[in-house]
Amino acid sequence: MLSIPAKHPAVGESESLASYWTFYWAVAAAQLSRWLPRRPSRVLDLSGPQTRYADQVAHAGHTVVEVRDAPRGTPQPRLTRTIVGEASSLGFLSPGSFDAVVAEGRMLSRHLVTENVVAEIARVLRPGGRVLLSVDSLVLGMAILAEQNYWAHLSDVPRSEVMLVPWPDGTITRCFGVEQLRDLLTECDLEVEWIRPRTALSPSTVEHVLKTSPESLPRLVRAELTAPQADEPVGIHLVASAIKKAGRRPSP
């Protein structure tokens, strides 16, 4: 059973496994860089205040509209506009008004009725537009349940269509397997390009390599990005890219 890496976004800021989290965020930045449109585009960022995705997108030359639940406390890049609002209800944005949407930082797992959020994302995307998103995985959810001795809940996992997991800090997140995530995106008229774990390399492996050879970080990130994908990824988070099917009119 997978143990929850310390300094997980949902459980606090321990210094344990610091090298792994340095690696984790380097991989996340590299995945976003590879995914972003090659030409300047209009991008909606829903990832929340705990991430730096909006800044990275703006520094890559894109115009960014960032939706968060509180105003920024730090200066924002010139090409970024911040809107204080609720990411699960994007009625203040016009249909088909964005070339791309970034819903990173596990934001979809924190909104338990994930279908509504994904439907809103699909609505504001233009036909042919793309979304990059991340969610908590079933593997992580099962580890959290096991660490809290919720054995009865664990036995129900194979029969569950929706997996809601209580965390020790009182929050609840929704966890997904690959097929559950694929079905959710497909039902919202999004065509899945790929689904993969954020990182396949284990925290213990990364910690060992970086403690022995700190300069190996770029090589580890490249190895992660080019690693062959298993049928059922085992990472704590899943990352997916999907495209809005062309030829469909945006819903009013």
Image (cartoon, rainbow, N blue to C red):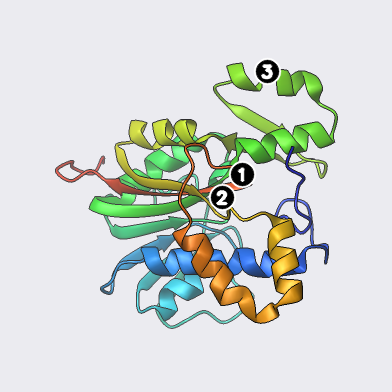
Place residue 93 in its image quadrant: bottom left
Q: Which mark is residue 107?
A: 2
Graded by Cα atoms within 10 Å as few (under 14), some (14 to 19) or many (20 or more), the crowding at tag 3 reads: few
Q: Residue 156 carries which label?
A: 3
- In the rendered image, which quarter contains the N terminus? top right
x 48%, y 69%: residue: 30
Q: How far apart are marks 1 and 2 (CA)?
A: 5 Å
Q: How far apart are marks 3 and 2 (CA)?
A: 25 Å
Circle nearer the viewer, 3 or 1: 3
Which badge, 3 or 1, is on the more N-terminal residue? Answer: 1
What kind of element bears circle 2? Answer: helix
Side of 118 relative to 175 (left or right)? left
Work out whether 121 lies above or below 69: above
- In the rendered image, which quarter contains the C terminus? top left
Graded by Cα atoms within 10 Å as few (under 14), some (14 to 19) or many (20 or more), the crowding at tag 2 reads: many
In the rendering, at what x and y percent does residue 88 appear? 49, 45
What kind of element bears circle 3? Answer: helix
Q: Which of 110 and 124 is in front in this view?
A: 110
Q: Which of 29 and 72 is in front in this view?
A: 29
Q: Name the residue under label 1.
A: 110
Label 1 close to label 2 by CB (< 8 Å): yes
* Residue type at numbered disc 1: Arg
Which badge, 3 or 2, is on the more N-terminal residue? Answer: 2
* Residue type at numbered disc 2: Met
Quick check: can you spot residue 94?
no
Q: Residue 88 carries which label?
A: none
x 79%, y 32%: residue: 146
Circle nearer the viewer, 3 or 2: 3
Work out whether 110 lies above or below 150: below
Place residue 217 in its image quadrant: bottom right
